[in-house]
Image (spheres, rainbow, N blue to C red):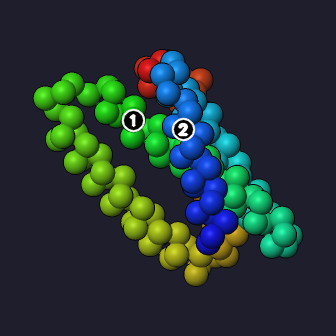
Amino acid sequence: MAISGVGAVVGALIVASFGHIKHKGRYALVMQICFGISMMAFTLAPNVWIAYPVIFIASIFMMCVFSLITSLVQLLVTDDMRGRVMSIFMLAFRGGMPLGSLITGFLAKKIYLPYVLLVEGLLLAIIAFCFLISKSQVKEH
């Protein structure tokens, strides 16, 4: 778990260096695709010496995505609605994680955890790619 924490700190430093770049949405989607790919790579790692660096890289992408999405929500919402929108965003964002973990745990018990994580990583990358190639306005901000 420590390697994941170090990766998250590195990811936070990377996002902090972004500053005022344009198209944060596009960067978030590309990093989301990379996060999905790194999740898939983790499930395919044959030993811990390969899994550790992959977890480190996945944590970097995860933190970058979380930070960029949160800042995008704040940038796109008007000042008078920001508090309300952020409370709903955090409820959905933080509330969705335990729900997703519950479903992942259930499926892992029925199937096999690496397969479940492989499919989750694949879905994550596919959904982000669909948003990237679509006419979504998120990638323009």
Q: Which residue position holds label 1?
A: 71
Residue drawn at 34 percent across, 34 percent down: 73
Residue drawn at 21 percent across, 34 percent down: 82
In the image, taking residue 86 as reference, residue 9 lies left or right, namely: right
- Of all residues, the one furthest to the left in this rendering is 80
Residue drawn at 47 percent across, 69 percent down: 101
Identify the image quadrant of the N terminus: bottom right
Whole-percent x and y of residue 112? Answer: 67, 76
Total marks shown come to 2
Front in this rendered view, residue 16 or 59 = 16
Above/below status of 57 relative to 69: below
Which mark is on residue 15?
2
Foreground mark, 2 or 1, reads 2
Callout 2: helix, strand or loop?
A: helix
Name the kind of residue labelled 1 in the image.
Answer: Ser
Identify the image quadrant of the C terminus: top left
Q: Quadrant of residue 58?
A: bottom right
Q: CA distance from mark 2 to mark 1?
A: 10 Å
Above/below status of 32 relative to 78: below
Whole-percent x and y of residue 7? Answer: 64, 56
Whole-percent x and y of residue 90? Answer: 30, 51
Above/below status of 93 relative to 109: above
Callout 1: few (<14), some (14-19), or many (20+) C-alpha neighbours within 10 Å? Answer: few
For the question of whether residue 79 can be seen, the reply is yes
